[in-house]
Image (tube, rainbow, N blue to C red):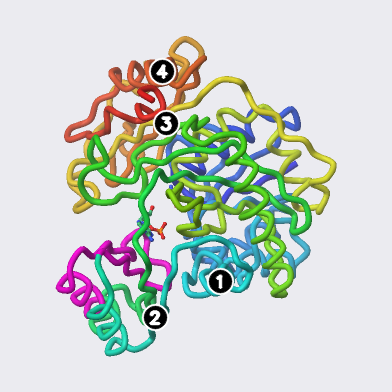
Amino acid sequence: MKILVIGSGGREHAMVWKLSQSPARPKIYAIPGNPGIGKLAETVQLKVDDIQGILEFALNEKIDLTLVGPELPLSLGICDQFRKNGLKIVGPTQRASRIESSKAYSKEIMFKYQIPTATAEIFTSAKKAREFILKTPKPLVIKADGLAAGKGVVIAESDEVAISTIESFMEKRSLGDAGSSVLIEEFLEGEEISFLVITDGKHVLPLAEAQDHKKIFDGDMGPNTGGMGAYSPVPLVTETQKAEILNQIMIPIVRAMELEGAPFTGFLFGGLILTRGGIKVLEFNARLGDPETQVILTRLQSDFVELLQKTADGQLDRFQLKWQDEASVCVVIASAGYPVSSGAKVPITGLETINAKEDHGLVFHAGTEFKNQSVLASGGRVLGVTACGKSIQEARKFAYEAISKIHFDGMQYRKDIGLKAVNR
Ligand code: AMP
Ligand code: GLY
């Protein structure tokens, strides 16, 4: 059996690692992969947006099943192209992936089907957006409609910031077409949680919940990043709340997509906030999260290959997800300057000293490259050190002990990943 994974981050390394544990013993390919993935899979140097090139590769190699990591190829219709050519793939159609690639579309569906979310107005005119800002109390949250790699959301405390964001997104087109429409949203406060499901369009199975740490510095300070670490399970959310999320948010959105003629299949990610006024949706993503995947898949006991096959075949009613009792913590190590700038490429030492069994730690690669026999940190989020333990506290201990063996110049990581769950 041949399985192809699309993407090159820590999320995709965790996917490939979990696939490599399957009793089905698949041959794994990754496009483009990274040096960590290269130890478990054959990597193929194509770009994730080269849909035609990836399709030709999959047809030539007779790939049995493909799993897509990032949003870009989904939004370009990779799943439609694969299915048209008789290839099995796990992920939503281009139409269904608009739940992530258009925040305006996503908001309209939530309003139409009464799925709880922040109130918002959608604007295509900068003039109207300005008028709305001036008459509405702050803070306000301004969101570019399209995909913006984490740069499309600004929390504006003042008229000045709100109006300059409108100018930047809509008039100067700082994010290209992604900012031609904007949402201006009510500001919500509360704990954030990532709640993911897998669906074949009809059946919906919840995954273990996780909490991401979006800010660069300890104590949730500094600018937003792609995610500096995650943990699972999340004791801040009760069993009753999880049932509510599944039954009042995740299942209803899957049903809504079906009624809209854009049935969703694959992994659906709810970015939620637990406010005093109830649980609300901040966003949906049409894929697994990064670094949520690293902690979710290290806790997954079931066979990942069978899960993906059953999803592709519309048979999720015949599958039961099993989870380890253990907790998992992933601490991301980023390069100097992240998330603002990317510094020089520097060698990483200590990677080979970490043993999954003795150290209870797995090192998932993200921003690394292999050059002259050594692994270099090439910028951004570099590694995701992930460990399981009897409790979050123990998993944290293992993860930070493993990190103490790794070094590269300028490395930075948060010391408080999962601490909220320990201190409560
Ligand atoms: P999004 O891409 O929509 O999930 O937004 C990115 C981040 O911005 C979220 O994880 C939140 O931390 C923050 N955010 C988004 N929408 C809101 C909101 N309505 N109120 C407060 N914070 C928000
Ligand atoms: N960790 C958030 C995301 O993957 O979008």
Label 4 and label 2: CA atoms lie apart by 44 Å
Type of amino acid at the residue the image marks with label 1: Phe
**Residue occupied by mark 3:** 330
**Residue occupied by mark 2:** 181
Tag 4 secondary structure: helix
Tag 3 secondary structure: strand
**Residue occupied by mark 1:** 111
Residue 125 picture location, percent across and down:
34, 89
- Between circles 4 and 1, the one closer to the viewer is 1
Question: With 151 as the anchor, is 311 left or right in this view?
Answer: right
Q: Looking at the image, is 51 positioned above or below residue 308?
A: below
Q: Which residues are magenta?
A: 139-168
Badge 4 or badge 1: first in the primary sequence: 1
- Crowdedness of circle 1 by 10 Å Cα count: few (<14), some, many (20+)? some
Type of amino acid at the residue the image marks with label 4: Gln
Q: In the rendered image, which quarter contains the C terminus?
A: top left
